[in-house]
Image: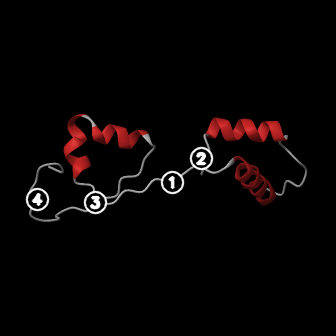
């Protein structure tokens, strides 16, 4: 219904799709390709830079009342690499 119902003549449905980067790839191929063509607005959040990962981690440690350094610089680099520059919730 979302891919075929009278979509050329009106706008009977408005939705918000939120997901991982693989969602974009899944929409382009297969049975969801028709839905992909009808998406009007797209936005993707870029990852943060390595120095920002250290600031982000430090900020959350402060919120948790942790004043001593918990992670070494190498550990922050590994965290950034593992997270691919994306923030957790």
**Place of residue 48 in the rendered image (x, y in percent of width and height, measured from the top left):** 63, 51
**Place of residue 36 in the rendered image (x, y in percent of width and height, measured from the top left):** 26, 47
Tell me if residue 38 comes above or below residue 79 in the rendering: below
Residue 40 shows which numbered tag? 3
| Residue 76 occupies quadrant | top right
The residue at 36%/53% (across/down) is 17
Q: Nearer the viewer, residue 63 or 47?
A: 47
Sooner in the amino-acid sequence: mark 1 or mark 4: 4
> What residue would you read off at disc 4?
8
Sooner in the amino-acid sequence: mark 2 or mark 3: 3
The residue at 61%/49% (across/down) is 87
Tell me if residue 75 comes above or below residue 63 in the rendering: above
Q: Nearer the viewer, residue 30 or 63?
A: 30
Q: Residues within 10 Å of mark 4 (few under 14, many from 20)?
A: few
Q: Residues within 10 Å of mark 1 (few under 14, many from 20)?
A: few
Residue 45 shows which numbered tag? 1
Disc 3 secondary structure class: loop
């Amino acid at each position: 219904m979302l891919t075929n119902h009278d979509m050329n003549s009106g706008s009977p449905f408005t939705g918000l799709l939120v997901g991982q980067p693989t969602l974009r790839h899944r929409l382009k191929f297969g049975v969801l390709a028709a839905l992909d063509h009808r998406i009007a607005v797209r936005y993707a959040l870029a990852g943060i830079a390595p120095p920002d990962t250290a600031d982000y981690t430090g900020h959350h440690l402060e919120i948790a009342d942790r004043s001593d350094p918990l992670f070494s610089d190498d550990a922050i680099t590994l965290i950034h690499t593992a997270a691919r520059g994306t923030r957790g919730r």
